[in-house]
Image: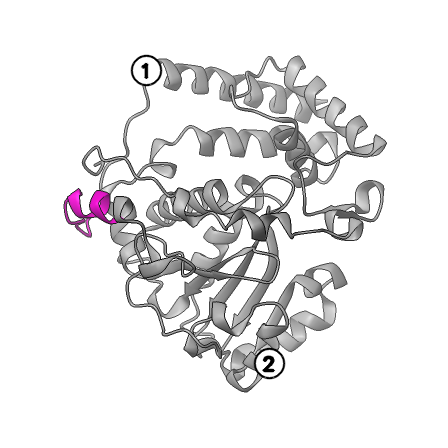
Amino acid sequence: MLQQQVALNFEYLKPAQYLIDAIVHDPQYIKRRERSKSQRRIWENVPYDAYEKEKMADFMKIVAKNKIQLPADWQDSDTLKMVYCGKFKDKNYLKVLQSHLVWRAVPNNFQPTDINIAFLQKGIVYTFGRDKQQRPIIIMNLELVNLKQFNEEVYINALSYYFGIIKKNCFVPGKIENWVFIMDTKKLGLSKFPFKAIQIATKTMQVNFCGCLDKLYLLNPSSSLSFSWKMVSAVADADTMEKVQMLKPNEYTKIQERIPANQLEEQYGGKVANLTKFWPPINIEIPGGYTEEILKAVESMKTAEIVIQKEVPASEEDELKLQEQMAKIQIKKEDDDDD
C-alpha cells in the first residue's frame, strides 16, 4: 500500500554549493588501473578511456541484438556500470542487465509504501553526516536486522528506496558519487549474525548501485567475528580489503581519518548526540536537521503499520514490456547454452 499521496522533497540533503566547489579528486580516485583490472569511483562528467568505450560498444551490440529496450532515462554511465558489473565480459552482460531491469520494474523499490516507511522508522538503516569529501554516511544497525519481522522482499524494497533517495539527493555528478557505509555489528556472535540479510543488501547494491561504495566500516565485532575476519583477510584480494575496515570501539578514532568528529555520532567516537529519529533522513548541517516542508509532508502521511503489504502493481503495459524483454533474454541465454 502506498502512503498517502504526499510530495516528499529531499533536496535539503544536498550539501552547500561552496562545499561541492571545494571538492577536487585525484585522477587515481576517479579511475585507476587499466583494462579489465580497472576500478572507477566517478562515472559522470569525466572522460572514459578507449577500453571502456570499446566494452560499452560491445554491451550495446548485445542490447541491440536481443532487441532490448533500455529505460528512457538510461545514460552512458549506466552502460559503463553494467560493463563493470559484468566484469568486462560479453557473456555476463545479459545476466547483469536482466537482473537490473527486473529490479527497475518493481514499483515498491522506488515508492514510500507503508512497509518501506515502517522499515526506515526502525533505524535498521539511516544516514548521518558526511566525510571530508562530502560523501554521505549510511549506517546499518545489525542488531535490529530481523527477517522474521521484515522479509527478504521488504529488505530489497526498503533499501532500494532509501539508497535511491541518498543517491538522487546527496550525490553530485562528477563530484560526489559514492557513500561511506558503517555496519555496526553490535558484537553479534556468528550464530546470531544476519549473514542472509547482509547478502541481500550486498546483492542489491552490487548491480543496482554499482560503483557507489567508497568505504565500509565493520564496527564493534565479537571475538568470533574478529577471528573469522582475520582468516578472510588472509585470502581476500587487496582491492576488497582496501575498502573494508573492521574496528573495535577502542579503534574508532581511526574513523576520523576520513570522517570529522562533528559528522559522527557519539557512539562512534564523534561529537554529535546519537540519533533517535531515523525517518526522514537527517541533514545535520541545517538547523533542526530537516526543512519545515519535509516535516509537514511526513506528518501528513498516515502512521506506517508493520505488516507485509502487496506490491504496487505495475501498469499492464509495463508488465507486458518486461515479460517480453525477459523472454527474449531467456531464449537467447538458452540458445547460447546449447552452442
In the depicted view, which residue is nearer to us: 188 or 260?
Answer: 260
The x and y percentages for residue 318 are: 39, 18
Within 10 Å of disc 2 (Cα), the crowding (few <14, some 14-19, many 20+) is: few
**In this figure, which residue is indicated by the disc labeled 2?**
227
Residue 73 in sight in this render: yes
- Element under label 2? helix
The crowding category of the residue bearing disc 1, from other C-alpha atoms within 10 Å (few below 14, some 14 to 19, many at least 20), is: few
One can see residue 178 in this view: no
Q: Is 334 displayed left or right of 167 in the figure?
A: right
- Location of residue 300 with respect to 89 vertically, above or below: below
Q: Describe the element under mark 1 as helix, strand or loop.
A: helix
The tag earlier along the polypeptide, 1 or 2, is: 2
Residue at 59% in and 49% down:
20
Which segment is the magenta one?
Answer: 295-307
The amino acid type of the residue labelled 2 equals Phe
Q: Are marks 1 and 2 in contact (CB under 8 Å)?
A: no
Image position, residue 268 (x, y; %):
47, 76
Q: Quadrant of the N terminus?
A: top left
